[in-house]
Amino acid sequence: MTMPAFAEELGSRLPSALEKAAANQLRQILAAQVSGDATLRLLDDDKKPTEVTLTPGLSKLLMEVLRHVGRGDAVTLVPVSQMLTTQQAADILNVSRPFLISLLEKGEITFDMVGRHRRIKAEDLFSYKRARDDKRGAALASLAEMDAEYL
C-alpha cells in the first residue's frame, strides 16, 4: 500500500502553522462527538458531499494523531504487523541502538533474524514499551506515595 503524497510530506517534516490549526479544529469537532458514532460530511474532488461514519474507537485514534499534529509534532504510523529494523525500534523507544540490541540479546523483546539482520515485529516492540511504561508509572506512583509520607 502506498502512502498518499501529503502523508509522506507531513510525516517527514514538522506541520505548518496552518496544518496545526486545522488539526486542532478537527480534533475539537471530533471531541464533541466522541461518545457516539460521528458522521463527517466531506466534499470529494467533484465537490459532491460524501459521508463517513467514525466509530468512537476510530475517533479517539484520529484525535490522538491530531493532538500530536496540533502540538507541532511529526507523526509516523506503524502497522503492528510491520517488521522494524533495530534502528527504527531504538528510535521508537528513544534508546540507543546498542542498548536495544542488549535488550534483544537478553530476551526482553522477541526478534527474528533475516539473514544477518535482526528484525522486530512492531507489535512485540509496542508490547514491551507498554510493559516498560506501566512499570515506570508504578515506580513513579510509589515514589510519590513515599514523598507524600514526608510532607
Image (cartoon, helix red, strand yellow):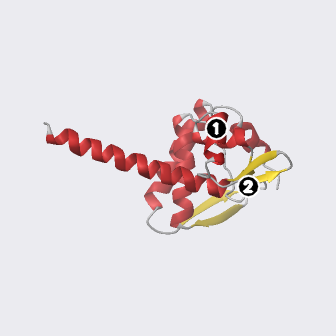
Total marks drawn? 2
Instruction: Please state which of residues 100 and 28 is positioned toward the viewer in this rendering.
Output: 100
The location of residue 110, given as percent across then percent down, is 66, 55
Residue at 62% across, 61% down: 41
Q: What secondary structure is marked by label 2?
A: loop
Q: Quadrant of the N terminus?
A: bottom right
The location of residue 106, given as percent across then percent down, is 61, 48
Give the answer, above or below, for where 30 lies relative to 86: below
Residue 16 seen in the current view: yes
Q: What secondary structure is marked by label 1?
A: helix
Image mark for residue 91: 1
Instruction: Please state which of residues 37 and 125 is positioned toward the viewer in this rendering.
Output: 125
The location of residue 13, given as percent across then percent down, is 68, 32
Instruction: Please state which of residues 113 and 86 is positioned toward the viewer in this rendering.
Output: 113
The location of residue 100, given as percent across then percent down, is 63, 40
Q: Are marks 1 and 2 in contact (CB under 8 Å)?
A: no
Instruction: Name which residue type carries label 1.
Output: Asp
Does residue 138 appear left or right of residue 102 in this picture? left
Instruction: Name which residue type carries label 2.
Output: Gln
Q: Quadrant of the C terminus?
A: top left
Q: Which mark sits nearer the N-terminus, 1 or 2? A: 2
Image mark for residue 47: none
Residue at 15% across, 42% down: 149
Decide: few, some or many residues near mark 2? Use Cα within 10 Å; few <14, some 14-19, many ≥20: few
The residue furthest front is: 106
Quarter of the rendering containing residue 97? top right
Q: Which residue is mark 2?
A: 82
The residue furthest right is: 115
The residue furthest left is: 151
Instruction: Please state which of residues 86 and 30 is positioned toward the viewer in this rendering.
Output: 86
Gap between marks 1 and 2 measured at Cα: 15 Å
Residue at 53% across, 39% down: 70
